[in-house]
Amino acid sequence: AEMAAVLEIEGLRKTYRSRRRGTRQALDGFDMRVEAGQVHGFLGPNGSGKTTTLRTLLGLIRPNGGRMAILGQEVPAALPSVAGQVGAIVESPQFFPHFSARDTLSLLAGAGGVPQTRVMEVLELVGLRERAKDRVKTYSLGMKQRLAVASALLKNPKLLILDEPANGLDPGGIREMRSLMRDLAASGMTVVVSSHILGEVQLICDSVTIISLGRRVAAGPVAEVLAEHSGNGLRVRLE
Ligand code: ATP
């Protein structure tokens, strides 16, 4: 039997209508499938529909059509029951600069009904244990991004969704984010990471879905997809 996908999207459609920007079809029958234990790259140029897809998946936007399932359960209907198994960062979280990382996570754990013992565990996972007592304002951007990942890991999710986690990071920060994602996948977590940078996805991911103009244009193991599409000049222009 075919193994159940951690994430399945079929024929997803979303049209934005605004007075200022008019009508815009952001997703035009988009498909995506992610298997367990993968770091899956969600690759496409700016404006191709990545953020819309991720926000729709998390129930923040209502689609106009199509279906989605997380861990075999239809969303958004089943979101309340799968929510505890999904960690997501779809916009840069704002932390109180005068709080330490530990206090920040301690508050979030308290609010989310997560045991306080989990706080130092997740700080260890993201490599911030040594800096746990330092105020967030002393953190680099890369450390703040990893603190954001730590906050998404509090619930020990099966699926972690990150929208452009490497955005704005220097090469060292990108390396650390990359090894963090590899470690999480090695521990059995499934990670979906969006990016508009081909090289980044190549370095980080096992498999990839490429989106352009709200449609899937390629998907599969990262090496295969990139080999197949580099010759004919990837219809998608990235960066
Ligand atoms: P980026 O990397 O820039 O976030 P993206 O791939 O995530 O790009 P989306 O943000 O999903 O793309 O945007 C897809 C399309 O929908 C774009 O053309 C965008 O201009 C449009 N769009 C997004 N949000 C809205 C909105 N609230 N109202 C109208 N149009 C929108």
Image (spheres, rainbow, N blue to C red):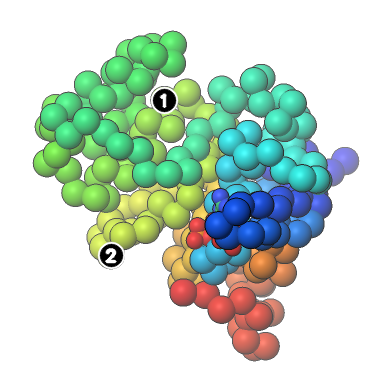
* Residue in the image at 77% along x and 45% along y: 64
Q: Is residue 202 visible?
A: no
Q: Position of residue 145 (x, y in %)?
A: 32, 45
Quadrant of the rendered image holding ligand 1:
bottom right
Q: Is residue 188 left or right of residue 130?
A: right
* Residue in the image at 72% along x and 43% along y: 63
Q: Position of residue 41 (x, y in %)?
A: 56, 58
Q: CA distance from mark 2 to mark 1?
A: 27 Å
- Asked if disc 1 is less than 8 Å from ligand 1, the answer is no
* Residue in the image at 45% along x and 40% along y: 89
Which structural element holds mark 2? helix
Q: Is residue 210 above or below residue 157?
A: below
**Residue density around tag 1, few if under 14, some if 14–19, many if 20 or more, within 10 Å:** many
Observer-nearest of 203 and 73: 73
Q: Is residue 20 left or right of residue 227?
A: left
Q: Is residue 42 above or below residue 232?
A: above
Q: What kind of residue is marked 1?
A: Leu
Which structural element holds mark 1? loop
The residue that mark 1 highlights is: 154
The residue that mark 2 highlights is: 171
Q: Position of residue 60 (x, y in %)?
A: 59, 36
